[in-house]
Image: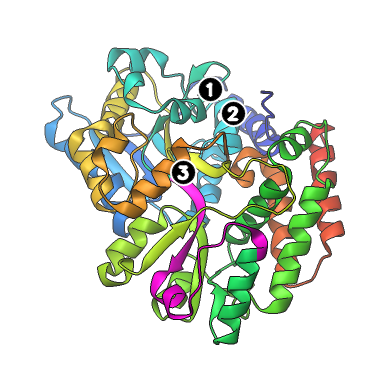
Amino acid sequence: MRRIIPYRLAVLAAAMAVLLTACGVKSTEVTTSSDEKIITYWNIGTEGADKEVFQYAVDEYNKNTESGYTVESISEQNDNYKEKLIVAMSSGECPDMYTSWSGGPMIEYIEAGFAQPLDELYEKYGLKEKYMDAALAQATYDGKLYAVPVYNVSLAGIFYNKEIFERYNLEVPSTVSELEAVCDRLLEEGIIPFALANAPKWTGSMYYQCLATRYGGLEPFRKAAMGEGSFEDECFRYAGEKIQEWAAKGYFPEGTNSLSEDDGQAKQLMYQEEAGMLLGGSWYIGTFASDSPEFYEKVGWFSFPAVEDSDADPSIQIGTIGDQFISFNCEGEKLEEAFRCATYYTTDGAKELMVDVGKIPPTTDASELITDGLTRQILEAAAGASSVQLWYDQYLPSSVAQIHLTTCQKLFDFTITPEEASRQFEQSMENYLAGQ
């Protein structure tokens, strides 16, 4: 499969090359933190289950190392993290270790010289055989491993309140038409069908991705991303039309584009039973379980339903096998010590913690560790998938991804038509491929 190198960080890399050259440092050299015995580690583990898991390896490494190195964890909320990382790179202050979502951003960082190949360290520490093949594939670029998967098999799916479904005699839908019937019934009862906080844009993009994939399968997206097809394909127009049809019917909360995901405004609608369903990543298992074990007992899950009369494979899933991936911006002894810290995510203690907080380790023994029924259901969906499509905003070049996210968000408040959204999406891809 052809890889597309995002244009934004290519420009950034050129700017950094000028900066480093002006300072008398070759652009190919690795910039590290000033304190040689401090390993800086940036991640998104700010609270709850995420914080517990990310901090685990740091604490274990610092407790057991005799190298003299200390890992310092610095966390940032999801929506601010990517920009902060790019700003740090542009100023030559990239941390020694940092997490990313794989796909396009990771490739940008590699191409800009802020990630190192890890194949020899994988071999030395016997790490390769511990991870699922799909996780290693998402950590690989140009035939080399550049990252270590941290945790979680993250798939897009629909969480629902089982008690509400039982109260109104609703069944889990297998088609989009059946899903719409569920939504219409919930509206009749004064319940918002979908809890959605779409201020960060990527939350609403899940609907677009699921609808397009269920309508057209994988090929339209892959061809459009390679410049061999178009984002004006029928499946993308269908996705935009459905979003606006659902928004017009009231399937989403009022003012959804101003609601904050990071502030928990979507999950609160579920907790208060103002909403019956939530389309989200499987990381929500840990969120629900840690926030309210009582509410978690009410939660069910199903894959996004199939589109009637479509021959697209309904087993296809959207998400990541590994979720967060650690890359390394250091070398020599410091690189090996930073890598050693990352290996603690594959220990029994780390995997048990992941499972306890509702995460799915991307390791080969994951199915042996999980007893929770909801988590096993998601793992089985991942295992049974013919393919797992990486999130669009991770797969695509950054400049194109931003256009996709912006136009997708506008679909929800009708400030753009589905045709205009598809055209702008396609034009951004054409501009990128043309180097504009």
Question: Within the image, what quadrant is residue 334 found in?
Answer: top left
Q: What are the residue bounds of the magenta stretch?
A: 154-177
Q: Circle 1 — which element?
A: loop
Three-letter residue code for mark 3: Ala
Do the residues bearing badges 2 and 3 touch, measured as CB atoms within 8 Å? no
In this view, 39 is above or below 54: above
Three-letter residue code for mark 2: Ala
Q: Circle 2 — which element?
A: loop
The residue positioned 49% from the left and 47% from the top of the image is 155
Residue placed under numbered mark 3 in the picture: 381
- The answer, for residue 36, to whether it is visible in the render is no
In this view, 312 is above or below 210: above
Do the residues bearing badges 1 and 2 touch, measured as CB atoms within 8 Å? no
Residue 297 horizontal/vertical position (percent) = 30, 67
The residue positioned 69% from the left and 51% from the top of the image is 402
- Alpha carbon distance from label 2 to label 3: 36 Å
Question: Within the image, what quadrant is residue 179 found in?
Answer: bottom right
Residue placed under numbered mark 2 in the picture: 112
